Image (cartoon, helix red, strand yellow):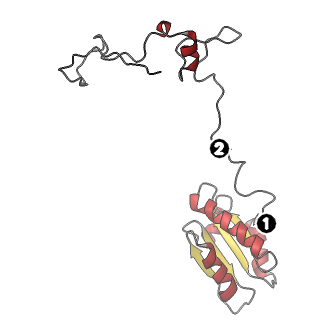
Amino acid sequence: MSLFLHCHAPHHSMATLSPFSTFNSKPLCASLPNPSFLTHQQQQQHPYPLTTTTTSDHKPLSVSTLPRKLLCKPPKGKYVREDYLVKKLSAQEIQELVKGERKVPLIIDFYATWCGPCILMAQELETLAVEYQNKALIVKVDTDDEYEFARDMQVRGLPTVFFISPDLNKEAIRTEGLLPIQMMRDIIDKDM
């Protein structure tokens, strides 16, 4: 079944909108035919409701009261969770790790919860934490919570990642911005 739109504009003129046109004039086109002309079966099959529907409380239904279907599941909180391998640490805990003896490289991710690239980097670091579970220690520092520590470490861009070797003769490697996961693997495997 097709619905025809009734146009009241003359065939020889074009309808144009002007900021000076008045709203008291007749509308150029009617949107839908009168629902009373349709049979009951046609009204049921129509994709848009043409008549007012009421609920059991006799309140008219509107778009805002109809149940909504979600297109995707909403996220379940922040990307740093308790069950993640990459743990969020305080400045004091980080300093103790750096000063202490380690047999594996230490990777410190400076991030912020509002930083989009930090969220992407968190996923990559979690993958690395699974791959290098016993070969590297990966931790996070929230720059909003540890502002002074981030300033002391000269963190100017996010995400900033420090790769600190267990060998005290090797200098730490510092990166800013989103890194490909293969580049992080190469730093851990070749430079630590």
**Residue at 68% in and 58% down:** 145
Q: Nearer the viewer, residue 137 or 53?
A: 53
Query: Where in the figure is residue 160, as x and y percent of width and height?
Result: 60, 70
Quadrant (top left, top right, bottom left, bottom right) of the C terminus:
bottom right
Neighbor class of circle 2 (other Cα within 10 Å; few <14, some 14-19, many 20+) is: few
State the separation of the CA atoms marked 1 and 2: 26 Å
**Which picture quadrant has residue 92?**
bottom right
What's the amino acid at mark 1?
Leu
Q: Is residue 120 visible?
A: yes
Neighbor class of circle 1 (other Cα within 10 Å; few <14, some 14-19, many 20+) is: some
Q: Nearer the viewer, residue 82 or 184?
A: 184
Ranked by sequence position, the earlier of labels 1 and 2 is 2
Rendered view: 112 above or below 188: above
Query: Where in the figure is residue 140, as x and y percent of width and height?
Result: 71, 66
Rendered view: 52 above or below 184: above
Q: Nearer the viewer, residue 41 or 104?
A: 41
- Name the residue carrying label 1: 85
**Which picture quadrant has residue 138?**
bottom right
Contact flag, marks 1 and 2 (Cβ < 8 Å): no
SS class, disc 2: loop
Q: Which mark is residue 43?
A: none
- Image side of residue 21 versus residue 111, left or right: left
**Which picture quadrant has residue 95?**
bottom right
SS class, disc 1: loop
Rendered view: 76 above or below 13: below
Q: Residue furthest left?
A: 12
- Name the residue carrying label 2: 72
**Residue at 69% in and 72% down:** 108
